[in-house]
Amino acid sequence: MTVCRPRVITLLTDFGNQDAYVGVMKGVIAGINPFANIVDICHSVPPQDIFSGAYLLYTSYKYFPCKTIHVAVVDPGVGSRRDIVCVETKDYFFLVPDNGLLSFIIQNEKPKSIFRITNNKYFLPSPSNTFHGRDVFAPVAAHLSLGVKPQQLGIKINQLEQMDIPTPISKKTGQVEGQIIYIDRFGNLITNITQEYLVKGAGGQKSEVGSKKQDAFKKTSKEKILSQLCTMETTIGKKKILGLSKTYTDIQAGEPLALIGSAGFLEVSINQGNAQKYFRVDRGNKIRVEMGSY
Amino acid sequence: MTVCRPRVITLLTDFGNQDAYVGVMKGVIAGINPFANIVDICHSVPPQDIFSGAYLLYTSYKYFPCKTIHVAVVDPGVGSRRDIVCVETKDYFFLVPDNGLLSFIIQNEKPKSIFRITNNKYFLPSPSNTFHGRDVFAPVAAHLSLGVKPQQLGIKINQLEQMDIPTPISKKTGQVEGQIIYIDRFGNLITNITQEYLVKGAGGQKSEVGSKKQDAFKKTSKEKILSQLCTMETTIGKKKILGLSKTYTDIQAGEPLALIGSAGFLEVSINQGNAQKYFRVDRGNKIRVEMGSY
Amino acid sequence: MTVCRPRVITLLTDFGNQDAYVGVMKGVIAGINPFANIVDICHSVPPQDIFSGAYLLYTSYKYFPCKTIHVAVVDPGVGSRRDIVCVETKDYFFLVPDNGLLSFIIQNEKPKSIFRITNNKYFLPSPSNTFHGRDVFAPVAAHLSLGVKPQQLGIKINQLEQMDIPTPISKKTGQVEGQIIYIDRFGNLITNITQEYLVKGAGGQKSEVGSKKQDAFKKTSKEKILSQLCTMETTIGKKKILGLSKTYTDIQAGEPLALIGSAGFLEVSINQGNAQKYFRVDRGNKIRVEMGSY
């Protein structure tokens, strides 16, 4: 006899923790696959905020074991004609309403297949129009975890709905304008400026014609370039932050700093403080970076 | 060797998520039955709000697998003479303080047995007077999940305490007055008017003496009658909502609607908005339905 | 074949529930040990509040099964030179930043060993400087749960950082001045005055020279002494509470009371109310006890 590794099913919703909605989904899953390992990613996505849901899913999905089934339900269109889809990528399954929730992720990896879920054999009987989390997502996820194949769930389609994700804008060399795309519990201001973007920006300035120099540049490690960014300047509102810190504690407690956060984005923080309160900013506010004088 | 299905133990409390109370209960359970599958239903029941606890338990219990042990601790009388009881129904076990927490559920199904829990062999040693969740409920639930029988826990009793559950009032044919009994995270206003009540009310108007007509009525599907309710009118405060929607998105974003929610109750909502804020109402506020002109 | 008891890994953090940080840690653990039984103790520790984290860990750790791995991440110094340590006690493993998080616990039990964690073989590749919960704590805990020994994780050290824990002050016999060290969801005011301290204080007054009397005293049970405390007087602000209650319901609803709470500390509460709001106090406020006239 072999004891199989329990399959992980993750849940990310805007259902909150004050009602029983999430618990009910887990009950349905446990009834179908009692060995499923259900892990909460987050249920505090602001109601109907697909963008935040997409961001949180993007920053977490790849830390789960291969073949994890990620179920994300931020679904203002529940009960309407929007589709529910099962998306398979190289390592994961995603079960989501087709409303843009995977927009960040599919920038990173191409889906292997997309199926519109129509086979109500895998739903609860008489599904409601208002709680597909319980009546469709949970039972379908549980069946997937037992080995049902995506093609058994419905009809193959070719394209997913996508959300506009704001990209940083570079008006002149060495300058980038980004914006705050997420603010976490600690008040850290996470921007859409990626580490790669900064590295490219900084490296770009230095690159010259000529194969030898180019080659030399290729060998310059990302870390080296990032360390060159110590003279960069981040502007938020009328305030300026000099340099790129490595950790929150590079700076005195209570002082602002910029660093590359754990999801790979440029982030403005206050050591042991709350940058959102300090700067009085919100999602969508602009942040400028000058990768100037080095 | 057979690997048994892990038994599900659910937890529903007013302990909140800011302290360690819930985690401690799980520790106690894991110490007694390491294979128990503990599922949180909800821990954000407002402190001492037995009514909300009863509502949440009612809307979730039957979505769990057979033989699930539902532990609910909303217990303002902890340490006093109130009883702790183990209630067995056809499919489930409930472990609750005997204070009305099962009032909604026993409207639905008759208990097979009720035992007052007195056998401290299944408690933690020297139980406190203030945290029976840890010292009584958790260990007893864990022992039940290992196969201990309810009759081993204490003394058989015949009756449970019950809470008054407000029922809708119908002053004249085709009119119902209900009230808001629960408001969820999205601000949806859930009333005590059930789908059955509406169907009966609407059907009732139409039924006449004579067996053939009666029979014909019986065959009228619930769906058909519900669809007739499209001309009903729901009044909340001074505002009126016409018709019964099927989904939130039947109506423009920002507009109010009435529908049968996922727990089978009439519910007033705002598509992509918050009906509690919109109508400035609270639990207990009246809602009138006129099933008039069709 | 034997199915091993799944090892429990507990998580206590200040990461909150609004982001995906906790979910990501669970993903990392499940990827390394899919059979680990992960239990949340609490994630709502106020940001960077090591003291509250230490209190919550202290009140919960010993309710978990033997060999549980307790992971606590309240870590304002993340990425700086503070150490991460694995502390083994008689029954448990603790994985914590070395910043005082174990201060309450090591008053109770001496560590068997302390290892500074340096072996990055057990970390995620390229650990970030801002999210050691994901990159260090989670994978190290998972490896420990698979049987890796603390000595494989790093370098043995002898001492832990400690936080000042305020102790009650007794200026004259029968009087104690303590302070509020924690306030829970219900608004219960938990002080640093332990049951033992009260028993000693009350008993101390009665003890006299002479072996027989001393012996007799030894036999006086803790319960008996506590019952003598029924005439004690607790002063908070300008208000006085007479006696020591056994349960919240000893007193009328809405009235204040003092009792020994479930963690063994003197606690001021309101029956079915919120003592923090009633007394308008906060952590650090003084509470005086007079064990006077009996």
Image (cartoon, coloured by chain):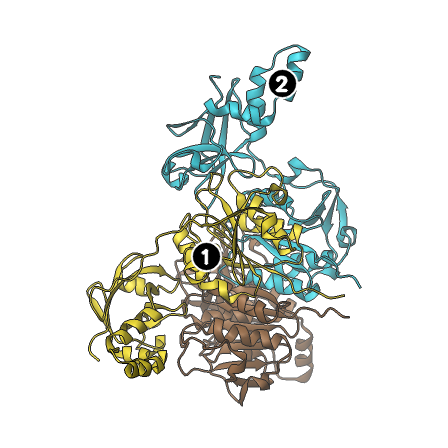
Chain colours: A cyan, B brown, C yellow
Q: Can you say whether A229 is above or below C24 in the image?
A: above
- The residue that appears at 78% across and 61% down in the rendered structure is A2
- Residue A125 shows in the view: no
Q: Can you say whether C230 is above or below A76 in the image?
A: below
Q: Amino acid at mark 2?
A: Phe
Q: Chain of mark 2?
A: A
Answer with the quarter of the image where residue A128 lies: bottom right
Pointers 1 and 2 within a single chain: no
Q: Amino acid at mark 1?
A: Ala
- The residue that appears at 64% across and 17% down in the rendered structure is A216
Q: For mark 2, what is the residue?
A: A217
Which structural element holds mark 2? helix
Q: Position of residue B220 (x, y in %)?
A: 67, 72
Which structural element holds mark 1? helix
Answer with the quarter of the image where residue C208 lies: bottom left
Residue B275, which numbered label?
1
- Count of numbered labels shown in the rendering: 2
Q: Nearer the viewer, residue C264 or A46?
A: C264
Answer with the quarter of the image where residue B89 lies: bottom right
Q: Position of residue A11 (x, y in %)?
A: 60, 54
Specify whether C67 is left or right of C254.
Answer: right
Q: Can you say whether C209 is above or below B185 in the image?
A: below
